[in-house]
Amino acid sequence: MPETHASTRAAQVAQGMQPDPDASIFRFMKLPPELRNSIYSYAVQSEGACSLATFQDPAITAVPRQIRNESLPVFFADSVFKTIVDANPPERASVRNNRHRRLEVCQHRAWSGTMGIKRNVMRHIRESGGRATFRHVDFVVCNAAHVRDRRHMKRPREDAVRMKVCRLSLSYVERKLYVAVSGRKVPGWRRYSPKNYEIADVDAAVEDVVAIARQIVERDDSIGFTVQDVQRTAKGFRFSA
C-alpha cells in the first residue's frame, strides 16, 4: 500500500521525530521563472476574446503582489482583446466621389476613432503601467452613423456590431506585425445615402490604421501595444480631409 503524507507524519510522531512543518507546502515561487510563466499562461486563458472596454483581471492576479506583478503581463500579452471602434467611411466616400459632404456626414467624424472604454477600466490599465502591454487586438469597426443612432435610441454600443464595417486583427509576435482583415461589407442603401460607402473606403481606412500600427511596432523600445498605442491606432479610423 503506498505511503501517504498523513501516514508518514504519524510514523514520525510515533518514533519521537519532529515532523517537518514545510513538508506539505508547495514552494511555487521557487520554481524557475519560465515555468511560472507557463503556469500563468494556462491560468489566464479565457474562452474567446476579452472585451477591452469591460474586462476583469483573472483570479490568479488577486493573490500576493509578486504573483500579481508576474501574471498581469502574461494576461495582457497572451489574451486577445476585442474593442469596438467607430469609423466614418461615408465621409471618405464623399471625398472620393467629389460629392458635397452633407453636414450629418461630417458630424460623424467626432464619433470616429473612439472605443468607449469605461473610465474605471482605463484607470486600471494605466495603473498597471508597463505590465499592460497588448499583443493581440481585434478592432470591430462600426459605422459611426449607426453607433450614434443607437446611442440616441439608448441601445447598447455592442448592438452596433451587427452592422459592422469589418474586423481588423493586429498581432505583435517577435517584433513583427501580423494583420488579418475579415467581414468587410457595405450597406445596401441607395447610392447617394449619406450613410453609404464602398469596399474601397473600408480598405483605405484599414491601410491608414495598419500604417500607424507598423510605426508603433518598429520603435526601438517596442514590446507590444500600450493602451495609448491602441488609442492612437483606433484614431486612424477617423477620416478627415
Image: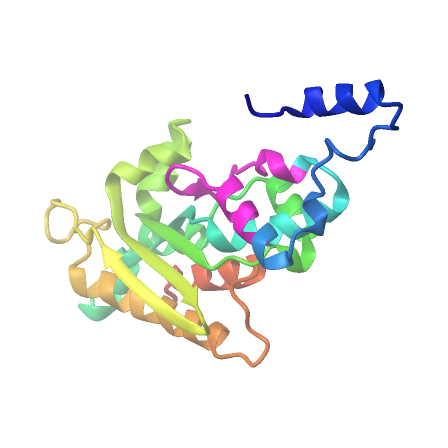
Tell me the quarter of the image containing the N terminus.
top right
| Left or right side of 206 for 112 | right
Residue range highlighted in magenta: 37-61
Q: Nearer the viewer, residue 51 or 166?
A: 51
Question: At 26% across and 37% down in the image, what residue appears?
Answer: 162
Q: Is residue 175 above or below residue 73?
A: below
Inspect the magenta stretch and tell me whether residue 76 lies in it.
Answer: no
> Residue 136 location in percent, x, y?
43, 56
> Residue 182 location in percent, x, y?
22, 54
Q: Nearer the viewer, residue 197 or 199?
A: 199
Tell me the quarter of the image containing the C terminus.
bottom left
| Left or right side of 11 for 33 | left
Q: Is residue 85 above or below residue 177?
A: above
Question: At 55% across and 46% down in the image, what residue appears?
Answer: 39
Q: Nearer the viewer, residue 54 or 22?
A: 22
Is residue 169 visible in this depiction of the protein?
Answer: yes
Q: Is residue 8 above or below residue 49?
A: above
How many marks the image carries: the answer is: 0
Give the residue at the far front of this rendering: 15
Question: At 62% across and 25% down in the image, what residue appears?
Answer: 3
Q: Nearer the viewer, residue 48 or 29?
A: 29
Residue 239: name its quadrant. bottom left
Residue 98: name its quadrant. bottom left
Is residue 101 visible in this depiction of the protein?
Answer: no
| Left or right side of 1 for 31 | right
